[in-house]
Image (cartoon, grey):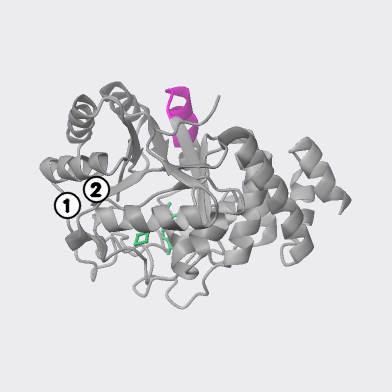
């Protein structure tokens, strides 16, 4: 247990030490110790407040072909949709009335949405909702594109690194994609003044505890403002259709570790966590998470944004999701707040 106490004291360890802690993930006492500390740290910085982000899944077209993802370009069975700018603004209007002050534009890497189109959507959202933060989650782009979006008013950018191990990265993605390019994007986004979010799936095929220790070291080095992690869940039309899902317990263990390592980080209790366990998001909050990301996409499109099987919240209206999550958050002693929810300085 010495290594646990050292971690809690110094908040930083070597790869070897992270791996040593990760090997204890099935030990309930270790998890108790870590999550107790994580909740304490979370309380110090954020009290009992939970931030919300209104997620707008505006296109499920994608030119990439990541082996784990249901909307990968190579999935000819996926039925594709795009929202118009008017649809997107309608989602924002709906969301604003429900109290959302952050909108996340998430989509596949869809060439139809040129940089100019994206910048135009951002400008319009910003001019109608100047008090809201805009988060983009639209994949790998050039420095110039990122700069254009930033100048148009985007505040934050989510781009999970997926795994910090080169070899593992290659087994999850086709050869056109590389970890090096992902990292280039993340560092450039940071340089451009975005609040950045990295992250990874827990239990993706081939992942080892040593890989997860590398993810911890990478996050320690990158110092992102946000970290999105959730269990891997197979999708029936992917290369990984027959693989096992990731573990909810290991995800919770990692959430606690990340909170301790990056005390002020914005850490969502993800939809994937809620999909594998009906109380997954509540457990995530109780392990150190402080953000939830309900869906604002039109109900008719929701099922089509199917990254993995059995995704929850695909039948509910935005207002229902907001209320449902509000109750869930209260059930573990926290409160949803209607604010932008920037990371504390
Ligand atoms: N299971 C869990 N998460 C997934 N993602 C993509 N496919 C899956 C899956 N099958 C995650 C990736 C991506 C984010 C938008 O969703 O980490 O970055
Ligand atoms: Fe979406 Fe419960 S959070 S229905």
Whether residues under marks 2 and 1 lie with C-beta atoms below 8 angstroms apart, the answer is: yes
Splitting the image into four quadrants, where does ligand 2 fall? bottom left
Q: Residue at x 15, y 43 (%)?
A: 90
Magenta-drawn stretch contains 81: no
Q: Position of residue 268 (x, y in %)?
A: 49, 48
Question: Is disc 1 placed on a helix, strand or loop?
Answer: loop
Quarter of image, res 155:
top left
Magenta-drawn stretch contains 190: yes
Residue at the far bottom: name it: 242
Is 257 situated above or below 263?
below
Q: Is residue 1 in sight in this rendering? A: yes
> Which of the marked residues, 2 or 1, is nearer the chain's N terminus?
1
- Which quadrant is home to the N terminus? bottom right
Q: Is residue 44 left or right of residue 136?
A: right
Question: Crowding near pointer 2: few (<14 within 10 Å), some, many (20+)?
Answer: some
Quarter of image, res 24:
bottom right
Q: Nearer the viewer, mark 2 or mark 1?
A: 1
Is 243 situated above or below 342?
below
Q: Position of residue 285 (x, y in %)?
A: 55, 52
Q: Residue at x 30, y 21 (%)?
A: 151
Secondary structure that dominates the magenta span: helix
Question: Crowding near pointer 1: few (<14 within 10 Å), some, many (20+)?
Answer: some
Q: Which residues are magenta?
A: 185-194
Which mark is on residue 110?
2
Mark 2: is the Cβ under 8 angstroms from ligand 1? no
Q: Is residue 160 in sight in this rendering? A: no
Residue in the foreground of this view, choosing between 72 and 317: 317
Q: Position of residue 120 (x, y in %)?
A: 17, 30
Residue picked out by circle 1: 82
């Amino acid at each position: 247990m010495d290594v646990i106490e050292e971690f809690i004291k110094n908040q930083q360890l070597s790869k070897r030490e992270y791996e040593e802690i990760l090997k204890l993930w099935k030990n309930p006492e270790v998890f108790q110790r870590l999550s107790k500390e994580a909740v304490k740290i979370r309380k110090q910085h954020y009290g009992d407040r939970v931030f919300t982000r209104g997620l707008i899944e505006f296109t499920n077209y994608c030119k990439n072909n990541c082996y784990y993802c249901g909307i990968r370009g190579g999935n000819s069975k996926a039925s594709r949709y795009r929202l118009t700018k008017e649809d997107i603004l309608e989602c924002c209007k709906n969301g604003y009335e429900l109290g959302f002050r952050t909108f996340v534009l998430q989509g596949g890497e869809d060439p139809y949405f040129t940089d100019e189109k994206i910048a135009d959507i951002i400008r319009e959202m910003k001019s109608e909702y100047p008090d809201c933060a805009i988060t983009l989650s639209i994949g790998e782009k050039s420095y110039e594109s990122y700069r254009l979006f930033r100048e148009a008013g985007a505040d934050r950018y989510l781009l999970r690194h997926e795994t910090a191990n080169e070899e593992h990265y290659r087994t999850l993605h086709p050869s056109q994609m590389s970890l090096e390019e992902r990292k280039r994007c993340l560092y450039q986004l940071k340089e451009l003044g975005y609040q950045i979010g990295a992250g990874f799936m827990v239990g993706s095929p081939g992942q080892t505890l040593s890989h997860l220790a590398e993810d911890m070291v990478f996050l320690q080095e990158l110092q992102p403002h946000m970290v999105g992690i959730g269990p891997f869940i197979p999708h029936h039309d992917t290369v990984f259709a027959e693989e096992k899902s990731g573990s909810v317990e290991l995800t919770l263990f990692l959430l606690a570790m990340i909170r301790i390592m990056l005390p002020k980080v914005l850490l969502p209790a993800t939809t994937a966590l809620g999909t594998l366990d009906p109380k997954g998001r509540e457990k995530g909050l109780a392990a150190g998470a402080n953000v939830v990301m309900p869906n604002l996409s039109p109900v008719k499109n929701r099922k089509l944004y199917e990254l993995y099987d059995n995704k929850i919240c695909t039948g509910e209206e935005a207002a229902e999701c907001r209320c449902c999550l509000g109750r869930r958050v209260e059930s573990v002693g926290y409160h949803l707040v209607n604010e932008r929810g920037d990371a504390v300085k």
